[in-house]
């Protein structure tokens, strides 16, 4: 990267927010909402959720302990525990295909200049099947040669959320051709969670672990 001019638009002025006149995902009726709120406030529901997160991630305890991100965040235990549950959903229980999830995370990490996030998820991305050619193409954006129409829409959704805090009608339509309601919601919250984490990593100065490569030079 260095001092050379980058071909990517990464920091631009935000447009006026778009406001929809009707919901893309209709809300539940009041009776169903009340029932689910009762479950939301039921301790046993939370106990079950937390236990699932622990079960899903206990085999990588040593790996998690080696990461500077958790060594930093655990200075604030209550916050870290909440983040761990959120992250546990995204990484282990999300409705998104693993490959799609990693494309989303790598793109928002790149847009946010979050080198630590990028480096860690290059590793995760390769683990779930992304190859170097695809990872390099993520840097180039949604119009890079080689993406099919859906993967192009997937990356474009990240760019639009980053720039406009909104996914355009055209991109949303492309996503709905392959994704159900849960997946559409997981997409938005995955990008949002990792943009938030990028802010923390950059602001707190979390450093790469020894031997881990950052952004491509």
Image (cartoon, grey):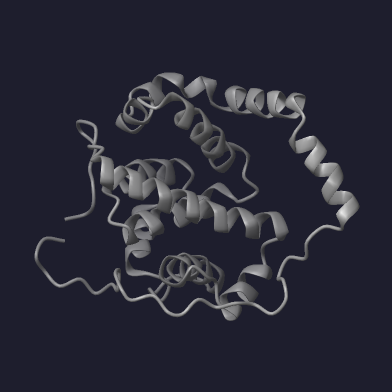
User: In this orientation, does residue 27 appear?
Assistant: yes
Q: Residue at x 56, y 33 (%)?
A: 85
Q: Nearer the viewer, residue 96 or 82?
A: 82
In this picture, residue 56 sits left or right of residue 130: right
Q: Residue 108's x, y, as percent?
A: 40, 58
Image quadrant containing the N terminus:
bottom left
Quarter occupied by residue 182: bottom right
In this picture, residue 207 sits left or right of residue 147: left
Compared to residue 35, the image places residue 17 above or below, namely below
Looking at the image, how many numbered discs can be counted on the residues? 0
User: In this orientation, does residue 130 appear?
Assistant: no
Q: Residue 51's x, y, as percent?
A: 65, 22
Q: Residue 202's x, y, as percent?
A: 27, 47
Compared to residue 102, the image places residue 22 above or below, namely below
In this picture, residue 66 sits left or right of residue 150: left
Seen from this angle, which residue lies furthest right? 31
Q: Residue at x 33, y 69 (%)?
A: 140
Quarter occupied by residue 123: top left
Image quadrant containing the C terminus:
bottom left
Compared to residue 178, the image places residue 95 above or below, namely above
Seen from this angle, which residue lies furthest left? 3
Q: Residue at x 51, y 32 (%)?
A: 84
Q: Residue 109's x, y, as percent?
A: 36, 54
Q: Residue at x 29, y 70 (%)?
A: 11
């Amino acid at each position: 990267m260095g001092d050379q001019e980058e071909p990517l638009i990464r920091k631009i002025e935000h447009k006026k927010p778009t406001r929809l006149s009707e919901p893309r995902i209709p809300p539940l009726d009041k009776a169903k909402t009340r029932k689910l709120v009762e479950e939301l406030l039921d301790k046993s529901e939370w106990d079950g959720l937390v236990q699932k997160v622990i079960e899903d991630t206990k085999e990588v305890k040593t790996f998690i302990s080696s990461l500077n991100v958790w060594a930093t965040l655990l200075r604030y235990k209550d916050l870290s525990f909440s983040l761990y549950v959120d992250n546990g959903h995204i990484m282990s229980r999300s409705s998104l295909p693993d490959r799609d999830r990693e494309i989303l995370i790598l793109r928002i990490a790149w847009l946010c200049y979050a080198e630590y996030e990028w480096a860690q998820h290059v590793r995760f991305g390769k683990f779930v099947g992304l190859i170097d050619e695809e990872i390099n193409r993520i840097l180039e954006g949604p119009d890079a040669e080689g993406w099919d129409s859906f993967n192009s829409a997937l990356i474009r959704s990240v760019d639009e959320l980053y720039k406009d805090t909104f996914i355009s009608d055209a991109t949303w339509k492309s996503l709905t051709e392959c994704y159900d309601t849960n997946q559409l919601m997981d997409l938005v919250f995955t990008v949002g969670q990792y943009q938030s984490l990028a802010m923390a990593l950059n602001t707190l100065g979390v450093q790469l672990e020894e031997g881990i490569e950052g952004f491509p030079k």
